Structure formats: C-alpha cells, structure tokens
Image (cartoon, rainbow, N blue to C red):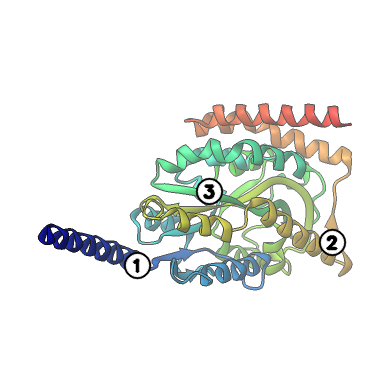
Amino acid sequence: MRMPQLHTLRLALLSVFATWALSSTATEAEPITGRIASSAPKGSVWDRQWDRYKVDFASRPDLFDLDYHIYGELGASEPLLGALKRGRVQFVATSQSVISTQIPEVAVLSLPYLFESKEEADYVYDCCIQDLYQPLVANENYVLLMFAEAGWSHFYSDRPIRVPSDVKGLSIRAAQSPAVVGFLQELEADTVFLTMSDVVPSLQTGMVNGGFGAITWHMGATREDAPHFTLTGHVYETGLFLVNKQWWDGFTDEHRALMIEAFEGFERQRVEVRQDQDAEIARLIAEGDPVYEPTPKERALWIAVGQASHAAVLDEIGGEAQPIYDRIMAAKMHFQAARVVSD
C-alpha cells in the first residue's frame, strides 16, 4: 500500500512543480518591444498627447518596452508604411493623404466638403468610418487602431483669398491625393506637388502662392511667408494610427487593452485638438493677421465648387471608393434626419 501512495505523492509534486514553472515563465516573460513612428511638431497639441501616451505605456514595463520616434526622425511617412508592412517599424501615425497613396480609397475622406460641420463629421466617423476602412487596411498587413484629429484644412496664401475665383491661376501646393488635385482643378489653380519640408522655401522664392492645411501647421511653418489665412474648412483631416498585424497578433488581451486605453480614443483626442486649434485661430486674429472668414453666401460658393469635384475623383480612385462614399452619404442623411427630429 505504501508504494502506490509514494508514487501518487511524486506525481502530485511533479504536477505542482510544473504548474509553478509555467506560472514563473509567464510572469517573467519579456515585455513586447516595438518602434513607434510619427511626425508631431514639437510643442504642439499632438506632442503633448504623445507625452501622455508614453506615461501610460511606461506604467506597465512588464508589458511594453517601446522606442519612440515621434518627431519624424525615421524619415518621410510614405517609406515608413513599407517599413510597417515588413515589421521593421511596429506602429505608424500617418495622415489620410499619405495612406491614400497605398490605399486609394482613403482619399474619399479628403473630398472637399464631404462634411459640412464638425457635428456631421463626428456622427459619421463614430458610426461608420472605422468599419468601412478596417478591411482595406487589413489587406495591407495593418491593424487600424484608431483615427486621430488633424484639424480642418484652410487656405494660407501670400495674398487675400475670399471666394473660389480668387484661387484661379495661383500656384498652390498640394499633396499627392486625387481628392486634392480634383479640387484644385475645379478652382482652376496650378497644382504644385511638394513635400511639407519644401513648402516654406517655395513660398519664399515665389514658386507657390499658397496651399492649405490645419492652423497648427500654418502657425509653425507658413505664417510668415503666407500670412493670409482663409477659413474655408473644406477638408476634415484625420490621421490614422496603424499597427503591424503580426505584432498585434502576438499581443495578449492585456497588451491590447493597455494599448487601446493608452491612446484614449478618438472622442477625447479630437476635442482637445479642436480646442487648441480654435485658440490658435483666435490668437492669429488678436495679433492682427489677415484672417478671413467667408460669409454664408461665399461659403456656399466654396461648397458648390468643392462638391462638384466628387464624381470625377471617385471615378479616378475606383475600387471601393463609390460604395464607401455611398455609405458616408447615407450616414449623413441619418444625421440630418436625427437633427430634424431633435429640433
């Protein structure tokens, strides 16, 4: 009777030891490493947000050991997408115009006056946009973690711009996006493709007369050489937080929960950016810069010209562009109907 009991005891001890060994291995697992790339202007609202994100990740060194390159140290965004796909970089924060060079359908989001108010944009983004683009992003070996506010695009220029006809014949800087090109063609402007780093020298030499972008970029780069700022608000610009899919697939639920929590969500992020950019516009006005806000009649002219470009641009983009556009239009109708009911 004693031998079986001893055998049973040995088995029990081995079981306890195996359980302890597995538990110890899991507890002592190395944190996940990764390189994060972005291009936040130093001192900007996005820079301050990154400071918060880093604090959250630093609070769990057992889960993540991340290497941050958030000021554009790793180079231009377009090559970074290739590095992200191959796993040389694990996380990239990029713009919708840059990602549209790889996923053309993202250019739909840059159509002028696709959204006519921040409330409308918020409704459509919250209900539909991530679901519409996640499958296309997945095809490129990425995971779309979230969209991020970049701000409304306005014209900056070396001369007054009030109505669409004022842009005719001007040399306007543009990104490589069919939505941007289509809009400038409707405005009968000369389109000049330049990287952001080339904009200021080109303004100084007269190669371009202006361009458009969010107020944050204007304050940091183009204000001195193109002081006229026209509040057209014609494109709602967002960034995309993209994660390498293989990297993401290696996460535990705890890793994923921390990453989602650290980035706080689109709702908080966009409110903070808008408050900051509204304050910057107010500062421009207070300091006497020539800031012009179109009248309702003038804004209607801008909207008509911008939306006239949609059909041709959608045809050029092809792929899933038209179905995505149709879904956005349907969501806009739901928003308008809900607003009528609430009123």
Q: In percent of the image, x 59 and y 42: which residue is there?
A: 181
Q: Determine if residue 210 is in view.
A: no
Q: For this view, does 141 lie left or right of residue 1?
A: right
Pointer 1: what residue?
29
Q: For this view, does 75 lie left or right of residue 45?
A: left
Pointer 3: what residue?
176
Disc 1 to disc 3, how far (Cα)? 44 Å
The amino acid on which the numbered mark 2 sits, given as a three-letter code, is Pro
Q: For this view, does 175 lie left or right of residue 157?
A: left
Disc 3 to disc 2, how far (Cα)? 28 Å
Would you call the spot at circle 2 few (<14 residues within 10 Å), some (14-19), or many (20 or more)? some
Q: Position of residue 162 (x, y in %)?
A: 82, 48
The amino acid on which the numbered mark 3 sits, given as a three-letter code, is Gln
Image quadrant occupied by the C terminus: top right
Tag 3 and tag 2, C-beta contact below 8 Å: no
Callout 3: helix, strand or loop? loop
Marks 2, 1: nearer the viewer: 1
Q: Position of residue 236 (x, y in %)?
A: 68, 46
